[in-house]
């Protein structure tokens, strides 16, 4: 009995001594032999590093951060890289797993984590279709410019404006349909911040109390207060 009690006490002491983290980001970067992995987030309109790990032979990594409410984080391979060179993901308390390759760091990324990440991926999947259509139009506009086809240029411009309008409306509807997710105010702040105040206000009012109390919920409320005071 005393032996069992002793083992229990040792296990309890070890678990109590181990630091608990709000957010753990772990994974594997195939092909990475040496370098440094950085975990960053946005603070005061700029990117700040919250954790980093030097890789030397072992491509596995584990990073940590404190976290109050769900928030977008970025995984970098270069300290001075731009946001476009990072893997972005929507984190919540717990563990997020990211597996990717050195060759196609962003495009090969497989992310398994928060419920917010799943919602965000649904949005990104549809937006890629809009962006793909827009790229096709850009190519056609270039060819029309070379051919000096004014009529086609005007037609293509109207199509581009229509895609942009549909993209805005899709984002608004997506946010409204996901009012119980922190992704909704985040999209309002980052994707359609220059939309009509009435549309942003509609999203803000629809949010659940939990989401309103989140980081992005509070930021959307503050943003609306500012733009309303300037109207």
Image: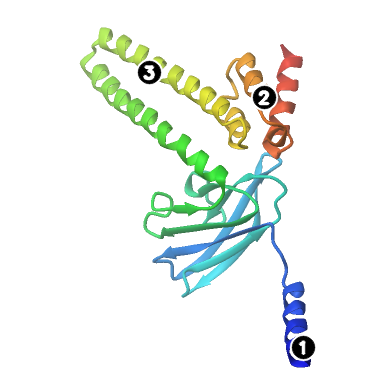
Residue tagged 2: 204
Q: Quadrant of residue 43?
A: top right
Q: Splitting the image into 4 quarters, where does residue 23 fall?
A: bottom right
- Of residues 147 and 75, the one drawn nearer to the viewer in this rendering: 75
Which residue lies at the image location 69% right of the left edge and 57% below the top edge? 22
Residue on which the image places disc 1 = 6
The quarter of the rendered structure image containing the C terminus is: top right
Q: Is residue 77 visible?
A: no
Label 3: which residue?
Answer: 160
Q: Coloring scheme of the render? A: rainbow
Viewed as shown, does residue 59 lie left or right of 4? left
Tell me residue 40's x, y (percent).
61, 52
Residue in front for this viewpoint, 171 or 58? 171
In the image, farthest residue toward the top: 151
Compared to residue 139, the image places residue 94 above or below, namely: below
Neighbours of disc 1 within 10 Å: few (<14), some (14-19), many (20+) = few
């Amino acid at each position: 009995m005393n032996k069992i009690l002793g083992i229990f006490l040792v296990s309890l002491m070890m678990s109590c001594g181990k630091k608990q983290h709000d957010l753990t980001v772990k994974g594997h970067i195939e092909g990475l032999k040496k370098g440094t992995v950085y975990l960053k987030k946005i603070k005061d309109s700029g990117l700040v590093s919250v954790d980093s790990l030097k890789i030397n032979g072992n491509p596995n990594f584990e990073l940590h951060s404190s976290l109050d409410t769900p928030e977008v984080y970025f995984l970098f391979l270069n300290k001075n890289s731009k946001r476009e060179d990072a893997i972005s993901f929507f984190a919540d308390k717990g563990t997020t797993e990211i597996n990717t390759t050195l060759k196609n760091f962003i495009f090969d990324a497989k992310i398994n984590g928060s419920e917010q990440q799943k919602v965000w991926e649904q949005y990104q999947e549809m937006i890629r279709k809009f962006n793909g259509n827009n790229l096709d139009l850009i190519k056609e506009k270039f060819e029309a410019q070379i051919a000096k086809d004014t009529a086609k240029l005007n037609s293509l411009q109207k199509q581009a404006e229509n895609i942009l309008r549909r993209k805005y409306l899709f984002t608004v509807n997506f946010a409204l349909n996901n009012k119980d997710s922190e992704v909704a105010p985040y999209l309002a702040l980052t994707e359609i911040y220059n939309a009509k105040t009435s549309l942003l206000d509609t999203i803000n009012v629809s949010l659940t109390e939990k989401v309103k109390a989140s980081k992005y919920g509070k930021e959307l409320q503050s943003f609306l207060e500012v733009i309303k005071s300037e109207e």
